Amino acid sequence: MALFPYCRLPSGFSFGNRKPLIVLGVCLLAGLIYFLKEKRMFAVPNDAIRLFSEVEQIRSGSYSKEVPVMTPWGAPLVWGDSESSVWRRDKVAHLGAHTGLAIMAIGNYNHYIRRLLSSADLYFLLNFYVTYYVLTDRPAELDPPLNLWLNRELRVIPVAEMPGWDRLGLRRMALLATLIKEQINLEVDYVFCIDADQEFTNPVGTEILGKLTATLHPLFYGKPRYTYPYERNSDSLAYVAMGEGDYYYSSEFYGGLCSKVLAMVQTCSLLILQDQEKGVRAQELEESYLNRYLISNRPTCVLSPEYNWWDSPGVPGVPTQRLCSIGRQCLSTGNYKGNPNAC
């Protein structure tokens, strides 16, 4: 390959002739442009290589298009098998963080608790210390207690019965705030709050750890913002104006550092109480207040729908189902994968 493929020096070149100097300058400029162009073609930025690698891994699932691995404000958008998740797990493997899993099992939700705990023992933060905090109005449901791994503890916290899912939805934030402040904050580094009708189905590791971690609601993943069920009643303290918001988050799984989660649930419980005093109730109950808070206080780690999934025509496929909502599945199909006993 010629060094200057775009021009040729005329014969009879002479320093006393100005025209050949102009031609030479043009050729040198053309050669420099060609050299830089060739170099750029072969030098791919490291960030591009990393993004390409992550997208290819995610494409091994059922997605046919590229998916984001970072939020617009620079927080990781977590897919469990992505390159960045592997890096995050390696980074914190030596920290030995103690994590709490706060579970509220009230009324009929007690039916799910053993299944959730058994699945957490198999898949949730393996090789790390985990304390299960179960708030229940039926402590006898956990008698006899489960046989847990050596690095697992179970704390049963009796609470009063709260009939009706809507009443539970409005009281849960206040109960969590009290529990985190008076007990959990003194015993563990991180806490994750989870609905009782969930089941871990694949490994959920330290890629989920962040100062404040939220999970994308699968029904609204990849959909335009105007479809999100934000609270539109301006009388409510959960109100979200048109044009606000980045994502719609699920209330079924969220967490982070105890101090950050405590600040969030305390704020949400206060807003709920103030709305109740005015006779106002947000459309999606606690989830509306959770989303209002996360718009003003963006999470530092966002989990993909792998961490809140169920089989439904409105829910996209994911590379790996890590945390599945049995309750949502039952509502969607009438049973769980054809097994009526699962509900």
Image (cartoon, rainbow, N blue to C red):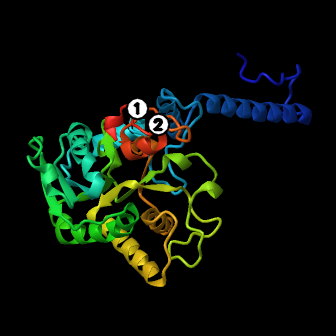
Q: Which mark is residue 311?
A: 2
State the residue at coordinates (27%, 57%): 107
First-in-chain label (1 vs 2): 2
Secondary structure under badge 2? loop
Taking the image as shown, residue 36 lies to the left or right of residue 228, namely: right
Taking the image as shown, residue 275 lies to the left or right of residue 128, namely: right
Picture layout, residue 9 above or below residue 199 = above
**Which mark's residue is nearer the viewer, 1 or 2?**
1
Quarter of the image that includes the C terminus: top left
Secondary structure under badge 1? loop
Q: Name the residue under label 1.
A: 337
Taking the image as shown, residue 69 lies to the left or right of residue 31, namely: left
Q: Is any atom of residue 201 visible in this view?
A: no
Say which amino acid is labelled 1: Lys
Where residue 38 appears, as percent x and y from the top left, is 66, 28
Say which amino acid is labelled 2: Asp
Where residue 118 appears, as percent x and y from the top left, is 21, 40
Report crowding for label 2: few under 14, some 14 to 19, many 20 or more residues within 10 A (C-alpha).
some
Picture layout, residue 261 above or below residue 3 = below
State the residue at coordinates (57%, 36%): 66
Where residue 221 appears, as percent x and y from the top left, is 54, 47
Quarter of the image that includes the N terminus: top right
